[in-house]
Image (cartoon, helix red, strand yellow):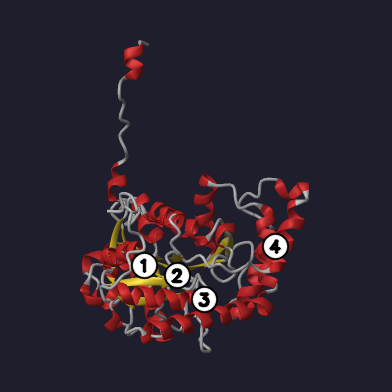
Amino acid sequence: MTTRALDAQVQVRLAGRMGSFPPYPLADVPRIKRELIAQGVDVIDLGAGDADLAPPPAAVRALREAAAEPAMSRYPFQLGLPAFRESVAAWMQRRFGVTLDPFAEIHPLIGSKEGIAHIALAYVGPGDATVMPDPGYQPYLGGTLLAGGVPHAVPLREENGFLIDLESLPRDVVARMRVLYMNYPNNPTAATAPREYLEAAVAFCREHGALLVFDNAYSEIGFDGYRAPSILEIEGAREIAVEFHSFSKTFNMTGWRMGWAAGARATIAALARVKAAVDTGQFLPIQAAAVAALESAHEWVPSNVSEFQARRDALVTALRENGMDVPLPRATMYVWVAVPRGIASEVFARSALLEEGVVIMPGAAMGKGGEGYFRLALTQAPERLALAAQRLARVASGAGTTAGRGVSNAG
């Protein structure tokens, strides 16, 4: 081969599906944030749902102890740690009154995100439709596109309680529908779903032969006495629903990447077959740590949720005092706020960062249906959240302090 041939530019063609993946808005935020901090700007990051709180001490101890055992460094495979499956089954029984076979109706995940994305590969083929909330979690769309399916995004409207209006779905979509994605308590809107709505969703999926993928990552972060249900509590759900849970939010274990799926034997078996082709399971010591987290949940989770509630109260109070009319969410670690003066959400988010050093999630970053809103995560202490509210109010009034003046190529 000649040197000239080696020097030639070669372009390897991407798969056509890659053109369907939307680019992430404000992809340059990490760089701008880093530059602002280097300039001495006090940046308050409320963008990602990644709290600054510590995980359960019992989980940390269990991880340390398990990692010291040579046998725990072997391949986990899809079985994983039997104690993890048994611990999940016991927790589901205590929390929801749902009885599950730990070895046939539960499956460990490398975070719920990968399971939600991978389940589409088992149920969706080219041309099949999936129905999902808009705005919504990225894996609903990503899993559909990777499977060759056709996503049908349903805008979540405030006047409808941010619920998917099942009765308004086009007939041709329903005829091709293989999966319905739902997420309540909801990210990003913080909406909760009445039990009768969940019953209707189960009946709808049973009628049309669709799999109900229920993302229940925020089930334990409820306020003012609210207790989120499991979809598996609903009569008739066991045959057509699969529920996903995560350790990320409830236990402040975002980077640990641990979760589980629960549902009918056939559904769990199908997910296991997909996962066997793409991964070899989560590190066993992390599964041991997850067991410790679940076993200490009754002692540890309430105080953690109380901290999130104090943060919610501080942020909502400060937003209202600064002229922003926001509802008090009953669940999740988010506050969903209307963008002032009808400004595009991405424009407002960039202004908040460059003018006031506050990182927020523009609603449009989670789908076109999120336009007109922005999301604030309860990831900072109450006093920092109150300060962020003051800064956002200045941006909304057009009186920002230009904290980021001089940041290069900020756009």
Q: Gap in Å between the C-alphas at discs 2 and 4?
A: 29 Å
**In front: 355, or 162?**
355
Task: List the residue tagged with mark 4.
Answer: 60
Q: Position of residue 256 (x, y in %)?
A: 59, 58
- State the SS at label 2: strand
Q: Cβ–Cβ below 8 Å for labels 4 and 1?
A: no
Does residue 362 lie above or below 284 as drawn? Answer: below
For residue 299, which quarter of the picture? bottom right
Precedes in sequence: disc 3 or disc 1: 3
Q: Gap in Å between the C-alphas at discs 4 and 1?
A: 36 Å
Task: List the residue tagged with mark 1.
Answer: 356
Of circles 2 and 4, the one toward us is: 4
Residue drawn 45% across the image and 70% down it: 214
Q: Position of residue 64 (x, y in %)?
A: 74, 57
Question: Residue 214 has which mark?
Answer: 2
Q: Gap in Å between the C-alphas at discs 2 and 1?
A: 37 Å
Of circles 4 and 1, the one toward us is: 1
Q: Gap in Å between the C-alphas at discs 4 and 3?
A: 23 Å
Q: Gap in Å between the C-alphas at discs 3 and 2?
A: 11 Å
Precedes in sequence: disc 4 or disc 1: 4
How many neighbours does mark 4 have within 10 angstroms: few (below 14), some (14-19), or many (20 or more)? Answer: some
Precedes in sequence: disc 2 or disc 4: 4
> Disc 3 marks which amino acid?
Ser
> Disc 2 marks which amino acid?
Phe
